[in-house]
Image (cartoon, helix red, strand yellow):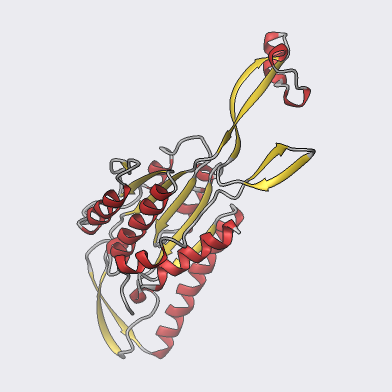
Amino acid sequence: MTPITIDDVAKRLFDFSYGLGSPATGIQNGLHRAFSRGSGYGFDRTVPFEADPDPRRINWKQTLLSLEFAVDQFVEEKNISVFEVDDFSASQCLGSKLSAIAVLRALFAFVTGAHRDRFAAYGATNIVEPELTVPLGVYKHRALELAGQVLGFTAEKPGGGLDKALRLLPERRSLVILVSDFLDDISAYKRLLPLIARHSVVALAIRDSRELELPSKNGFVSFVDPETRINVSAWLDKSGRKRFNAYALSQQREISSLFATGGIDCLWLDGSARDVNIVADYFIGKEG
């Protein structure tokens, strides 16, 4: 397997595009619906009916409280805020997965900077690492800096901070890139769905090849648990490998099915050079 590199990112940067995918409604010789990069029309404020007499936008709750007709006003949002939330648990720092996170951060930082959109990244262990933002105008250098910080990360803390990181996201609808290996019990991810329901979310699941297939050797084989650092010995044979492979595939299907119930697409990556193409092709297809 060829590892993913910055060169792989560079080949696709100018193809890459994205959008929130929500329709915007506007008036131009009738009512039209069209795709907009931003989240369409976002709430701005409430004003008296006399200032903006549109009965379609009456805020009935405010009207009843004040006993005067009130109308909601909206502003058209064109820019997108993109947040990448990365799981830095011990298993996520195994093998090719850490380098894949580094390249993904560089990719999204560069592309959002080119679109003049806001990009911020959170790293989650059992706490939430400080937010890393990319100022406009310096995104080219900042993108590589973000990648370097990821490659220098060592997982010395337990996982469990994804929910804490997601609680820091703003209320405004944003594009959220959720990056993890999703190896925890599925109940942990069920708790995440209400926290990201208002956003447009894409889950990037990164698995190392060693998590999908056991060694072909028969007999006793020693392993090291990346979470606990404990040595484990197991007897391997053909039937055992078959059961393990079936479990790994069923766990992937379970995660994909769970996210699908929340309207979240899940892309499965393996830390190889093809990951960039998978991610870029997905977003290009979504915008079209």
Which residue lies at the image location 36% right of the left edge and 72% below the top edge?
273
Quarter of the image with the C terminus in it: bottom right
Residue 39: x and y in percent read 57, 41
Q: Is residue 133 above or below residue 219?
A: above
Number of marks in picture: 0
The quadrant holding residue 100 is bottom left
Q: Which of 123 and 272 is in front in this view?
A: 272
Q: Which of 209 and 215 is in front in this view?
A: 209
Residue 216: x and y in percent read 33, 89
Q: Which of 216 and 199 is in front in this view?
A: 199
Relative to residue 188, is residue 35 drawn left or right?
right
Q: Taking the image as drawn, is residue 215 in sight?
A: yes
Residue 285: x and y in percent read 57, 63
Q: In this view, does 281 lie above or below 213?
A: above
Residue reaching furthest to the front = 29
Quarter of the image with the N terminus in it: bottom left
Q: Nearer the viewer, residue 47 or 79?
A: 79
Which residue lies at the image location 73% right of the left edge and 22% below the top edge?
58
Residue reaching furthest to the top = 67
Residue 75: x and y in percent read 59, 30
Q: In this view, does 63 lie above or below 72?
A: above
Which residue lies at the image location 49% right of the left edge and 56% below the top edge?
17
Relative to residue 64, is residue 13 drawn left or right?
left
Q: Taking the image as drawn, is residue 84 in sight?
A: no
